[in-house]
Image (spheres, coloured by chain):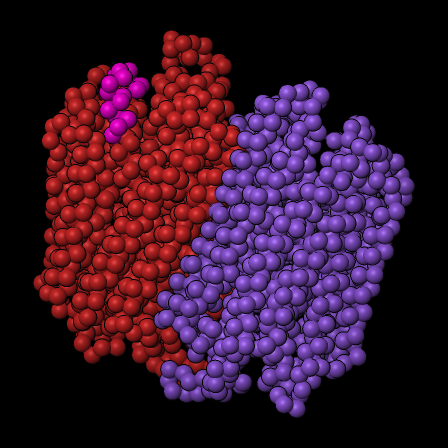
Chain colours: A red, B purple
Amino acid sequence: MENYLFWLVPTASLVALALAWYFYKQMMHESEGTEAMQKIALHVRKGAMSYLKQQYKVVGLVFLGLVIFFSIMAYGFQVQNSWVPIAFLTGGFFSGLSGFLGMKTATYASARTANAARTSLNKGLRIAFRSGAVMGLVVVGLGLLDISFWYLLLDYCIPTDILNPSAKLCVITTTMLTFGMGASTQALFARVGGGIYTKAADVGADLVGKVEAGIPEDDPRNPATIADNVGDNVGDVAGMGADLYESYCGSILATSALGAAAFITTSDINMQFKAVIAPMLIAAVGILLSILGIFSVRTKEDASMKDLLKSLSFGTNLSSILIVIFTFLILWALQLNNWFNISCAVVIGLLVGIVIGRSTEYYTSQSYKPTQKLAESGQTGPATVIISGIGLGMISTTIPVLSVVVGIILSYWFASGFDFANISMGLYGIGIAAVGMLSTLGITLATDAYGPIADNAGGNAEMSGLGEEVRKRTDALDSLGNTTAATGKGFAIGSAALTGLALLASYIEEIRIGLSRIGETVLTFADGSTIEIHQAGFTDFMYYYDVTLMNPKVLSGIFIGSMMAFLFCGLTMNAVGRAASHMVEEVRRQFREIKGILSGTAEPDYERCVAISTKGAQHEMVFPSLLAIIAPIVTGLIFGVPGVIGLLIGGLASGFVLAIFMANAGGAWDNAKKYVEEGKFGGKGGEVHRATVVGDTVGDPFKDTSGPSLNILIKLMSMVAIVMAGLTVAWSLF
Amino acid sequence: MENYLFWLVPTASLVALALAWYFYKQMMHESEGTEAMQKIALHVRKGAMSYLKQQYKVVGLVFLGLVIFFSIMAYGFQVQNSWVPIAFLTGGFFSGLSGFLGMKTATYASARTANAARTSLNKGLRIAFRSGAVMGLVVVGLGLLDISFWYLLLDYCIPTDILNPSAKLCVITTTMLTFGMGASTQALFARVGGGIYTKAADVGADLVGKVEAGIPEDDPRNPATIADNVGDNVGDVAGMGADLYESYCGSILATSALGAAAFITTSDINMQFKAVIAPMLIAAVGILLSILGIFSVRTKEDASMKDLLKSLSFGTNLSSILIVIFTFLILWALQLNNWFNISCAVVIGLLVGIVIGRSTEYYTSQSYKPTQKLAESGQTGPATVIISGIGLGMISTTIPVLSVVVGIILSYWFASGFDFANISMGLYGIGIAAVGMLSTLGITLATDAYGPIADNAGGNAEMSGLGEEVRKRTDALDSLGNTTAATGKGFAIGSAALTGLALLASYIEEIRIGLSRIGETVLTFADGSTIEIHQAGFTDFMYYYDVTLMNPKVLSGIFIGSMMAFLFCGLTMNAVGRAASHMVEEVRRQFREIKGILSGTAEPDYERCVAISTKGAQHEMVFPSLLAIIAPIVTGLIFGVPGVIGLLIGGLASGFVLAIFMANAGGAWDNAKKYVEEGKFGGKGGEVHRATVVGDTVGDPFKDTSGPSLNILIKLMSMVAIVMAGLTVAWSLF
């Protein structure tokens, strides 16, 4: 072990997991309320669990196929190291586990939150927030635990006297990136499947319930309402948990791999190890200080909504500032070369995340002009709502993209010691910025996961007829969740872009390893000059493979990558459309055939709707997800390394912008509707409201299915490329 | 003059212009119908002309500013040659002139088409098609005329004994590309302004007229109906004319510049000139054979609709096949090196265009599944129509992108003599494929421009009360136009992608010239090795500026480029939304304040609506258009050459896919509505119809404003980069 500081990493993760356990137990001691409330919560819990079981079956089959494939690659053709299949499996397992635990907590917490809201707003907030914190802490805790487990295992298992330390690091980083790919694969299925489930139910419930039958949201007379509440859990909780587990691990692992590369030419092998563990240390510091932030969220009993929001922001801000200070301290203590500049990259990453979060809030919150104008456009009907929303979403991409660009340039510039030619250090800096952005994940995810819990609590209150006052409180909790979720989404998208770049750089590193594996020792350039592979830098590989922007293979890859982002969105949008229309038919059928539903004398058949959403999601998630796995492999087999790099860049550039567009347009439509419901432009039930409901319905798959799935698509394609680099290097058509 | 074959170029252009004049005169001899018809036609003509005057004033100011700027650059700082300002002006002038002449013809032709339709369907088709052919022939005729004028002028004006032949060619190609930039700038304003105008009027007319008041399209009681018809002319005719003039000239000029580059290292200077004129010759052959195709479009008097479509396709197919044959002949006669493979690139370009056209037709025509399913989704309301349409549009990007990728790889591969390392020849091949794709423009544009004429004829027939039978005929003509327009759009988008790549390569050539201009004679690489600038190939420049995919400046450029495409679309979408809502308010006001409009006893105030659209378009077009000009300049000043290349690639990759998505989604929404109007799912006036009208309204700015403007954005950004290359080379921040 290089440094005693490393032990901070598993320690932080265990602290996080212990605290998650404590919060969970604390929540479970609360009462679940009346019999009706318990019954509804049970319905939702059962539906969610049975969905997850079904989903894990399908994903299990996909994993089985991939593990067999990797085993053949590793043990048969020996183009990969032998840890790959196992690492892949564990990544998938823990990503799924994060989602599962978060969702389990959420399904127990919602009725308890509703019940607590009967006492006071404050008590409701505490339960919901602490239950959200369970998810945040489980994700970061499990993430760092797995990373440190694999790191320690590999570090002890591979004898240094057989392989040189650099080669050892290579095995460590490749294996751990495969672990990341397992997490990504699981996350993509969870996001896509969960996203389709929740939005099919939501859109279906809205279209017939709100629009046709004119009954309010979460009304127990609506047969799709249980499916809708289940959807919040499987999509917004389990899906998001798996997603962010993957982002978190992905950014740390990619940056570690870049750290190994950045110091590959130094004589000081220790420095390589230091660069590898630096991102893990930053994450560990982030966990501990996030916990401090979570505990700092305390309010007086008679606090107003604004006070609550302030106290929440106080927690996040406190964590951020402390993380900045402690990052400088810990990197200094690690005695990492260039530690000051690298710490600056952490600060840059944090700042970029905050700017993106603020810009998301500006474009999607009804407190600001854009969303208010969007609501106003409803005066001329649904068509102008859609046109304006798409316009708003597209324009809203400007600030996030520009701030990521500034982040890329500055973090690169600082880490490279203000020398653009120092590519490997510069790229390490970009990775470090991504880790910095995600270092507060413990607390930001807590505020994020709190949203669906509050939403479900509202559903429970409505369905069990808790009365106006309670429903008003749960609505307030829900609305607070929307504001915090905006910031969370900004972090998720921004970090995906930076992590995508870091993964791209890791890909080049894998090329190096792949070439060594097939017996190459030197790179021979077009002009006849040569360089030894272990001495070659990023630029050398770029020139060796001619990854310039005039190579038609690179250009083809870029076009295909850009197209992939759109195709993937199109497939998931259509999937939601199809599944929702089945839901609509079923709800219409029940209204028609089961007499007395609308008068409240007969109970609708909730299970049928749950089954339809489950079947639709399972059926529809497979093709787009497999496409994301297959595209980089096929591109590699046809166009080789230049084509794959083009594909990743094209997918990243289009996918990033498309994801912001979809998330913001969807968020703005949602809040424009809420703005009208607050009594503007004729309020609930008026013409303008009806127009904004159309916008909200269109926005559902935008912001909760296609948009967030793009984040994972970007990273999964990179992960697949990395893991398959051995194959691409060994053979391609052109 | 290198070769007597060159004279084919001006000859072909003069033949085209003469024939356009003949068709115009022939059309003018026809009767314009009843007094009511003449009055309406006059209204539309006046509105269109007064709009164009207004537009030229605004564009004139922009041009004045740019010409002053270029003059300072050329005469003051001497970073550009002295022809640049004049070339820029003429490009703008002729692009505008193409649109103006096409529009003038169209405004005279529509009433005549409606009148002819009173006699027979066939006669109506003849007049509309031949009038469309005027536009097609004017665009290609003026295009080649200007190109040959500049080529001859510069060839004679620059003494070969002072400058070496290569330097002379450099001046020729730079100047001519500036001419292309003038055309692009004009085209962008025409497309954006015209697009906003037409869709503000269309959306406004539909929202109040069709949806609220329940009166049919083009009903004279609708105050916005004249503005709507004016819009078809200024947007779909004048805008499209300027646009395709620019595509046509741009692809030829970029390819010529690449031709000069491809043979720069040969000792045979003649070969350079041959490579420069080869694309012009292919275009000239294309013109002559398009004319043959136009004349082959003959039908029997009692022909059915299917016969007409067949006869139209026959014309296009005949032209295409003959162009293939004659291309081989003429390149052989020119004795161009590698003539056989280069001819193959022409064939590849033509085939890719056809595949894209077919795929567009499949995804947007109501004869096929996708659009039928889209109409079906209207059964669950407008929200699912929007979701499914967006899904359809996104999925429909797959075939066009993949076929362009295949086209890029194959045309490169053939032209390079099956050697990927032969970059300059390969890129020349890509340019040649673009020229091949546009070689049939004379006839495809005829079938394209025919659409709005038929549309306006329908409007005229409806407004002057010509009765059910005539309106049915004009509807049939309109519907035929929709089918042919799909193919035309495919060509426009596909050629924009290929031309974009060719322009990118030309940019590198301009870098060479820019470096020479500031006194550099050798490129010094990082490892200390050098190469003389006039000997350097594309790859050398790539390495010199480190334009690899690991350079953060390149990556930043790619992100910004991708964002630009979305931002530009967002701005134009919002512009339409705003202008349309003003229109809606005005129409509502008129219905409210002018008593008797709906009962037909009072005439609405058409002029007010025309004025609103004009003002809206003028006001809204300036910012997005200027943005397109400024972005490459600013990116260049901050990130230098690598940043600009990244910007262009990012804009191209995202913009291309986004353009297909928007065009196809819009087209499918339009036709899904038509499908319902044909009596499916309850027919006109039913719930499904209302849902699809929302889709159609959203689709209007998709397919006629934002989507087509993207084509020009891609090329204009490249043109600006090329023209400003001197400045970028001389100074940048990083």
Please check the rendered image and state whether residue A150 is part of the magenta-colored stretch, yes or no: no
User: As rendered, which of A48 and B701 lies closer to the eye?
Assistant: B701
Quadrant of image for the N terminus of chain B: bottom right
Residue A257 visible in the displayed image: no
In the image, taking residue B469 as reference, residue A196 lies left or right, namely: left
* Residue at the spot 43% in from the left edge and 65% down from the top edge: B635
The relative height of residue A36 versus residue A297 in the rendered view (above or below) is above
In the image, taking residue B710 as reference, residue A726 lies left or right, namely: left
Find residue A500 and report its horizontal and vertical position in percent.
35, 57
Find residue B386 and report its horizontal and vertical position in percent.
52, 36
Find residue A554 and report its horizontal and vertical position in percent.
49, 66
In the image, taking residue A556 as reference, residue A489 lies left or right, namely: left
User: As rendered, which of A368 and A117 lies closer to the eye?
Assistant: A368
Give the residue furthest to the bottom. Answer: B161
* Residue at the spot 51% in from the left edge and 57% down from the top edge: B626
User: As rendered, which of A482 and A734 lies closer to the eye?
Assistant: A482
The relative height of residue A611 versus residue B50 in the rendered view (above or below) is above
Find residue B581 and report its horizontal and vertical position in percent.
53, 35
In the image, taking residue B698 as reference, residue B246 lies left or right, namely: right
Residue A377 visible in the displayed image: yes
* Residue at the spot 54% in from the left edge and 50% down from the top edge: B621
The segment highlighted magenta reads A462-477
Tell me where residue B270 sits by quadrant.
bottom right
Please check the rendered image and state whether residue A476 is part of the magenta-colored stretch, yes or no: yes
Quadrant of image for the C terminus of chain B: bottom left
The relative height of residue A470 versus residue A629 in the rendered view (above or below) is above
Give the residue furthest to the right. Answer: B301
* Residue at the spot 14% in from the left edge and 52% down from the top edge: A322
